[in-house]
Amino acid sequence: MITLRPGSHAYRLLLLLAAAGEFPAHSLHLLGSVRSLETLVHRLERTQQFRTEAGADLGCCRMLSVSGRRNRRTIRLYKSALPLLNALDPAALEQYLALTGGHRFSGSDAHIQRNHRVAETLAMCQSAGIEFRPYALPPLQKQQITRVVPASPAFYIARSLKKLDSTEMNKTIFTRLTGALFTHETCYAVYNTRSAAMKWSGMGEFKTAQHLSELARMNAGIPRADHALLLGECMDVAFQTIQESDKGHRMELRFDRIYPHIHFIPMDRQGIRLLRILSLPDWNEQILSAAFPSEWRSDGPGIMEYDARRDGTFILSHLDGDLARLVRLRQALEHTDLPFEVLCFSWQSAFLRDYLGSRVALRELSLEALEASLGIGTGDQEPQEEEIVM
């Protein structure tokens, strides 16, 4: 018997599949222990008895089906499991049926990969404590300026954003744009580039940023969507993306001009914890206050970007993973001999050394130390195991 307890692996999988339709089997690590989850998925491919946390019987059914080969394997709900969604929330079932066209799936690889990009983004949000369920969020609108988005962090899937666009926006931008994250005073455009370097589509991305800015202003009172989150499988993706940007010839359409702040988030447990930090109120000030004594802090904009200064050495914080600031820093370093230091996490060091070379010194800060200073704990607890009675 499997108990669908909030916070358990089975419960979390059910929520994700209701919102995304399918989930890539090779990304189970985003939800917790891979070994535990793979064992659970195998069990859920067979008929099981389900019950609620309160003990109510939900009947017997097969919950999951898994198909595809190797890294293309996809996890979907089995049709007999739809009553579980209804028991979870009737709105969840209604949303799922609308998403999948009545529990029908395309065999197109492009369609599946698109769903997987969204599902991985939702998994990151779920693990970071960000609301992502479409049926639990008030719909965005473009009729009047009013507060629509919740006060707490909320992720809106790209599909809902696209419906509100009145122009013929380039469809290719929705290949990697997975949605928008509204968190306190910030609206992030969220991209998932997986294992490939992000190739920005120039004018298409510019129009996307304009569209999101309008939605942010109308629904959250945020004047501009000038931040983006770039999800990728590893730090090599960040390096490839930033090198790709250096090849651009039209400066006004380069990614760091469209989004002055682009934060790279690796799709692993470290990235989930960083995403949680970037969802805090006034996160930038909180990070800088925790990292530097007040007497070191920059007192305003200068000829180059930096966050602190110690004994004549300028220091920039890369604790937020901002790639756009790195681009501007490297350009500035070509015109000055001033000593410079970058503050980073250990898992960012190799990437920073490859991109900035020996021109700057690197100083590492542990993620645990920053989390402790921010008062949010490690945030890396394993989800509850299911109660399974054989």
Image (cartoon, grey):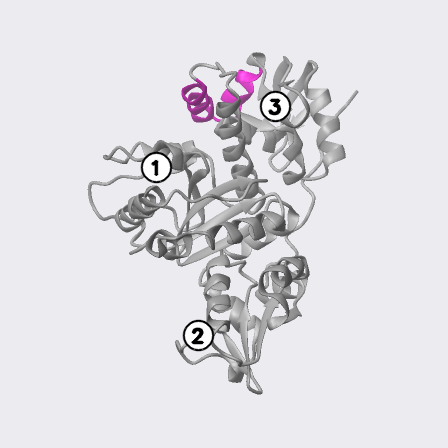
**Which picture quadrant has residue 349?**
bottom right
Quadrant containing the C terminus in the rendered view: top right
User: Up-down: is 89 above or below 103?
Assistant: below
Callout 3: SS: strand
Residue at position x 72%, y 38% in the image: 33
Label 3, label 1: how far apart the Cα atoms are: 25 Å
**Percent of width and height locating residue 10:** 64, 29
User: Which amino acid, by three-letter code, is at mark 1?
Assistant: Leu
Q: Residues within 10 Å of mark 1 (few under 14, many from 20)?
A: many
Q: Which residue is mark 1?
A: 161
Q: Earlier in the sequence, mark 2 or mark 1?
A: 1
Counting the numbered discs, the total is 3
User: Up-down: is 109 above or below 330?
Assistant: above
Q: Taken as a whole, is the magenta stretch helix, strand or loop?
A: helix
The foreground one among 234 and 367 is 234
Label 3, label 2: how far apart the Cα atoms are: 48 Å
Quadrant containing the N terminus in the rendered view: top right
**Percent of width and height locating residue 67:** 63, 18
User: Which amino acid, by three-letter code, is at mark 2?
Assistant: Met
The foreground one among 6 and 101 is 101
Q: Which residue is mark 2?
A: 304
Q: Is residue 189 magenta?
A: no
Q: Earlier in the sequence, mark 3 or mark 2?
A: 3
The foreground one among 250 and 232 is 250
Callout 2: SS: loop
User: Which amino acid, by three-letter code, is at mark 3?
Assistant: Ile
The stretch of residues the image draws in magenta is 81-100
Q: Which residue is mark 3?
A: 75
Label 2, label 1: how far apart the Cα atoms are: 36 Å
